[in-house]
Structure formats: C-alpha cells, structure tokens
Image: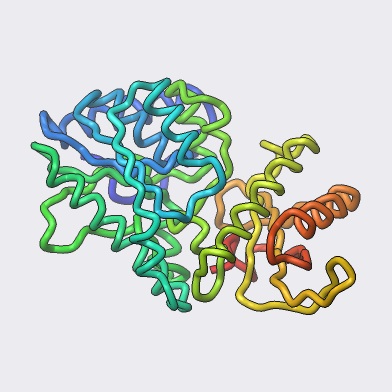
C-alpha cells in the first residue's frame, strides 16, 4: 500500500541507497495497485511529473499513457522540449493536446487567484477525461503531488489542482507515488531513475503555469510578456552561471501600468517583477542576491525586447512573509 502520509520517523532521502529503496517500494506498490490496467498521467515536463512518469514506466511500461496538455500557460519552448525528451528520446506513450484557446477562453475576466487555480485544475481533469474516453482500460490517474502541496493545501495557504481527489462522477483512482517527498528528495530519486540532469534539476513550475505569474485577469498580450521576459531571465541566469545554483527564478507581470519614456515618447506600460529564491523544501525561502551588473543587463533586455513593458522591479521578500509564487 502506498503511504498516504509522510511517516513522522521517515529518514530524509539524501543518498542513492535511500532513493533506491524508495523506488523499489513504490514500484512494487504501484504494480500491486494498478495490475494490468492503464494509467493516465499529466506530463508537464517538470521534475515532479517526470519522476512520476519514470517510476510508472519502470513499474508498468506501456500501460502508462502520458498526456502533455499545452494550456497556453507554459514557458517558451516548453511543449517542444517535452515532446523531444519523452516521445523521441524516452519512447514514452505520449499524447499531445493543444488546448490553449480552451483554457484562456475560460480564464477570461477571472481575477481571483484561487478561482483561476480551480478553473485550470478543473479543465485539466476534463481534458484528461476526454483523452481517457478515447482509450480502453484507463482506470487510474497519476499525479505529481508532493508533500509541500499537501501541507499548504491543508493549511489553506493555496489550492492545488493536484492535491485532492477527482469529481465523484469520474471513475479514476489516483496514483501519487511521490506525495510524501520534498522537492530535494524527488531530485535524488529522479537521478537514480536515469532522468537527464537538465530535467531533474529544472526549477519548479506550478501546475497552473504562467497563470499564477500573470496576476489579475489573464490577457494574451500580458501573458506573452510574462513568457518572453521569463525566457530572457532564464537565458541570462544561465549565461551568468546561476543555472542550477538558484532554486527558482521567474518573472511576473501584474495587471497595472506605469508611466515611462520610450523613443522620446510617453509610454504607459506594464512592469516586470523578477523573483529569485533559494530553498531546500519549499516551506521557507531566502531571496537570491543578484549581481548588480546582471540586474542592469536584465532591465535593459526586458525593457527593450518585451513588448508592452517599460519598468523592471525585483522582489526582495522571503518566505515567509511572501509565498514563492505571487498568487
């Protein structure tokens, strides 16, 4: 039986031996739980869902159907990378669904962050249900729920689309093999499963994607500003040798504008907020001290290359009092 709760006396997974023991335990538990049935997995390409996919492939092979949903809230180049790694390299049973318009239309005009999360999570389930109806023998839904998701949901800090059950009218049973692990433990497990380093150490990405980095009602142009500024941030952090050294870094484009000057003219445009933090378990986080020269380069590139942006800010708030994500 797969643990529903993290045991109080569970030793933190810090080495290969402990990771291997966890993998052996979970593979055996999933084989027993799933039998000869098929499993549907939401494969985002992030470390959590990737480790779940690798565990399931090890346990049940082609009985796993991975579904990569492009909800229009992914980072630049992400859908292409997921297809390359999982379908072309790992030969996974992968279904690609472009549901961009479907998600963004449902999110139009919605400002409350919890409502946005629930819409995105609910729509995910609907997409999976539609895919499941096209397949025979699907009885399980795998999820990349991790222990901080469970704790923060229980404490009412935020709602997680992957921290709860399915609607009562759906017949899927949940498979959540990493739900008792912290993020640092999942990375070690991923290494032992043979996942590529750039996937295992990829920075965390929330289930609602860029939807929680576009505060207020999501618009396509502001969403594109988040996507483009995020790509610049990741590129410059990599060039500065910070990739893999800073736990999580991203941009946010809030729903307000400020006055600026571009090409000698008044420009009333958005600002981009940069956030960069370090943590081990996502329960607390400290702000990264970005070199000033790097910050100046980021400001120059973002304000000149990202359409509709004239100002760049840096978020100095640790967790607590702020959460890692803005919404």
Q: Name the side, left or right, on which 100 lies relative to 312.
A: left
Q: Residue at x 84, y 68 (%)?
A: 262
Q: Position of residue 52 (x, y in %)?
A: 36, 36
Q: Name the side, left or right, on which 265 lies relative to 85.
A: right
> Which one is in front, 92 or 143?
92
Q: Name the side, left or right, on which 246 lies relative to 96.
A: right
Q: Position of residue 89 (x, y in %)?
A: 42, 20
Asked if one can make out residue 7 in the rendered structure from this viewpoint, the answer is: no
**Total number of numbered labels?**
0
Q: Position of residue 215 (x, y in %)?
A: 56, 71
Asked if one can make out residue 12 in the rendered structure from this viewpoint, the answer is: yes
Q: Position of residue 201 (x, y in %)?
A: 57, 35
Q: How is the image coloured?
A: rainbow
Q: Residue at x 76, y 63 (%)?
A: 314
Name which quarter of the figure residue 308 lies in.
bottom right
Q: Name the side, left or right, on which 61 lies relative to 83.
A: left
Q: Residue at x 78, y 60 (%)?
A: 303
9 w.r.t. 122: above or below: above
> Which one is in front, 44 or 106?
106
Query: Is the N terminus in the top left, top right, bottom left or bottom right quadrant?
Result: top left
Q: Residue at x 46, y 40 (%)?
A: 79
């Amino acid at each position: 039986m797969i643990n529903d709760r993290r045991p109080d006396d569970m030793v933190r997974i810090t080495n290969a031996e402990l990771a291997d023991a966890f993998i052996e335990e979970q593979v055996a538990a999933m084989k027993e739980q799933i039998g000869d049935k098929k499993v549907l997995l939401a494969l985002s390409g992030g470390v959590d869902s990737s480790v779940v996919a690798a565990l399931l492939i090890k346990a049940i092979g082609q009985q796993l159907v991975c579904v990569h949903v492009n909800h229009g809230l992914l980072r630049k180049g992400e859908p292409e990378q997921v297809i390359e790694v999982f379908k072309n390299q790992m030969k996974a049973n992968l279904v690609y669904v472009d549901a961009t318009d479907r998600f963004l239309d449902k999110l139009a005009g919605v400002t409350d962050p919890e409502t946005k999360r629930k819409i995105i999570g609910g729509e995910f389930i609907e997409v999976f249900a539609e895919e499941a109806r096209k397949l025979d023998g699907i009885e399980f839904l795998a999820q990349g729920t991790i222990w901080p998701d469970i704790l923060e949901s229980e404490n009412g800090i935020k709602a997680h689309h992957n921290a709860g059950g399915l609607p009562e009218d759906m017949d899927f049973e949940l498979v959540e093999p990493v739900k008792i692990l912290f993020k640092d433990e999942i990375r070690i497990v991923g290494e032992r499963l043979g996942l590529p380093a750039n996937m295992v150490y990829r920075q965390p990405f929330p289930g609602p994607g860029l939807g929680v980095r576009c505060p207020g009602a999501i618009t396509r142009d502001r969403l594109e500003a988040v996507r483009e500024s995020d790509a610049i941030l990741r590129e410059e952090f990599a060039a500065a040798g910070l990739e893999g050294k800073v736990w999580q870094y991203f941009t946010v484009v809030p729903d307000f504008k400020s006055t600026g000057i571009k090409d000698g003219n008044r420009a009333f445009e958005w600002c981009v907020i940069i956030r960069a933090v370090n943590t081990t378990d996502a329960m607390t986080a400290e702000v990264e001290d970005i070199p000033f020269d790097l910050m100046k380069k980021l400001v120059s590139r973002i304000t000149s290359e990202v359409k509709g942006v004239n100002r760049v800010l840096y978020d100095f708030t640790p967790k607590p009092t702020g959460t890692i994500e803005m919404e």
